[in-house]
């Protein structure tokens, strides 16, 4: 069964750093674009960042650009999100999500077919 | 960036009745080369991650009950629940994946009347 399991969430002070991990099970991790999506308490979904299969392309939401870094280790079937200079407004559940593979020559990603259970990040003093 | 909007913000429907949610994108998400609309619908129940319901605007994900259907093209889309069941209480989000950032609509909360 395909599974995505996030870890690394917690409480951090404003200006601090945190690194999230997402470990993938029961699929060939290296074949998929991977995403981070967050959801602030009681709010909607916000896409945060994504990374191409081999890691050569990375994209970020404007709200996190320059502060967050997405990376992956295909040998460990793992996705990461390094979060620096954290702000109160970064408080959210962070989900990792798999994007289905797009056909060559088509827009780079497709719909998100599997999601993890999420990791809660709380930024507060 | 493509901006997604949804209406209504919430709706209450009687069990067995139809629920209709609309989603609008600020630019067309129809890709001319393959004639596909890059639009998905997700269902999120309290305390759970989102679940994919519909992709390509109208293709039901495997295992999704056929009371869920998607329609529309270009910039205007609809998610219909033909006969609302108690387990359909959730927030529903549309998402475009035509371009980066792959943004979501603000969500529509569906409740039982």
Image (cartoon, rainbow, N blue to C red):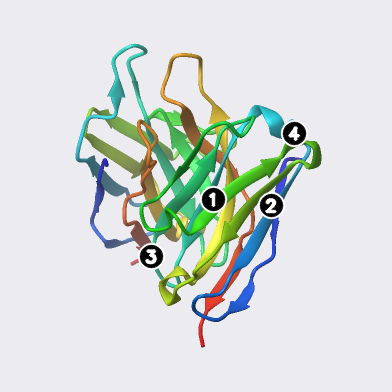
Q: Chain of mark 4?
A: A
| Residue B112 marker | 3
Q: Does B53 sit left or right of B95 as displayed?
A: right
Q: Mark 2 and mark 4, same subunit?
A: yes
Which residue occupies the foreground of this view, B1 or B13? B1
Q: Nearer the viewer, mark 3 or mark 2?
A: 2
Disc 3 and disc 2: Cα gap in Å?
A: 35 Å
Mark seen at residue B95: none
Marks 1 and 2 sit apart, C-alpha to C-alpha, by: 9 Å
Q: Can I make out residue B82 in this image?
A: no
- Element under disc 2: strand
Badge number at residue A36: 1
Chain assignment, label 3: B
Which disc is residue A22 wearing? 2
Do the dots labelled 3 and 2 sit on one chain? Answer: no
Residue B50 at what x, y percent from top left? 52, 52
Residue B26 is left or right of residue B38, and the answer is: left
Q: Which numbered dot is residue A27?
A: 4
Which chain hosts label 1?
A: A
């Amino acid at each position: 069964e395909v599974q995505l399991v996030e870890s690394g969430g917690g409480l951090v002070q404003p200006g601090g750093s945190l690194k999230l991990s997402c470990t993938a099970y029961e699929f060939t991790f290296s074949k998929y674009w991977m995403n981070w999506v967050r959801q602030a308490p009681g709010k909607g979904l916000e896409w945060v960042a994504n990374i191409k299969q081999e890691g050569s392309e990375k994209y970020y939401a404007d709200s996190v650009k320059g502060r967050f870094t997405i990376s992956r280790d295909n040998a460990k079937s793992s996705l990461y999100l390094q979060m620096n200079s954290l702000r109160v407004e970064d408080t959210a559940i962070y989900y990792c999500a798999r994007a289905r593979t797009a056909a060559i020559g088509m827009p780079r990603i497709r719909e998100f077919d599997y999601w993890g259970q999420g990791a809660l990040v709380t930024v507060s003093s | 960036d493509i901006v997604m909007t949804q209406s209504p913000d919430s709706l209450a429907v009687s069990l067995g009745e139809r629920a209709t949610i609309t989603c609008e994108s600020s630019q067309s998400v129809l890709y001319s080369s393959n004639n596909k609309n890059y639009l998905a619908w997700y269902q999120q129940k309290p305390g759970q991650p989102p679940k994919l319901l519909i992709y390509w605007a109208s293709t039901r994900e495997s295992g999704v009950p056929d009371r869920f259907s998607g329609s529309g093209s270009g910039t205007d889309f609809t998610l219909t629940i033909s006969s609302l069941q108690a387990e359909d209480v959730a927030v529903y989000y549309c998402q475009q994946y035509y371009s980066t950032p792959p943004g979501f609509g603000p969500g529509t909360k569906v409740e039982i009347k």
